[in-house]
Image (cartoon, helix red, strand yellow):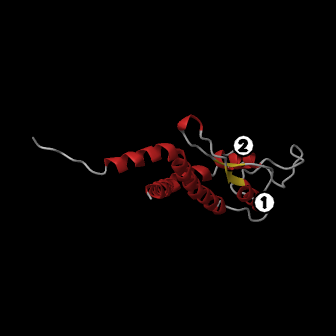
Amino acid sequence: MAKLTIQGLDDFSVLLQSLEQKGMAVAKAAVYAGADVMINAVKEEINALPQQQGYMRPGEKRDVVTRREKEALLQHVGIARMDDTGGKVNTAIGFDGYADITTKKYPSGLPVPLIARSIESGSSVRVKHPFLRRAANNAKPAVQRAMLEAAEAEIAKLQK
């Protein structure tokens, strides 16, 4: 009768147990790497927005952003805290805070998410410039690559 011996299964079993225990750390590293690439893509798209030169005529739909709006977007874009509920790891890129642009309705400053939304989707007084959608679509392959590389690097650390 033939005897079959398979070597290396014990090492593989130890690796799988380690991955199970450290899986959330691998996932967090991958998500953070992807978020870092995405936020850089969003900042590039913000810089590419058409900037206002001179004064606007009253009643005209704005097709540009002001320098102060662009600065507020760049200053207040960020990565949200990681959420790891239900065995999933998520985060978001978003805008928070207030710009130093005061109006009658917003005497303490315009909310930056409001500025971003009006530029992204347009409004009754602004032509839309979907910079977030463009950033997400253009950066998707780079984000996936960065996430894969980060996950592989974390798994390689576990194998040592």
Residue at 54% x, 37% y is 87
Q: Disc 1 on helix, strand or loop?
A: helix
Q: Residue 122 at x, y = what percent? A: 67, 46
> Disc 1 residue type?
Arg
Q: CA distance from mark 1 to mark 2?
A: 20 Å
Judged from this view, the residue extending furthest toward the left is: 1
Residue 53 or 109: which is nearer the viewer?
Answer: 109
Relative to 140, 72 lies left or right:
right
Q: Disc 2 on helix, strand or loop?
A: loop
Q: Residue 20 at x, y = what percent? A: 47, 43
Relative to 127, 102 lies left or right:
right
Relative to 96, 143 lies left or right:
left
Q: Around disc 1, counting alpha carbons within 10 Å, would you say few (fewer than 14), some (14 to 19), or many (20 or more)?
A: few
Residue at 43% x, 56% y is 159
To which residue does mark 1 refer?
68
Placement of the N terminus among the 4 image quadrants = top left
Dot label at residue 124: 2
Q: Residue 79 at x, y = what percent? A: 66, 51
Residue 71 or 82: which is nearer the viewer?
Answer: 82
Residue 9 or 137: which is nearer the viewer?
Answer: 9
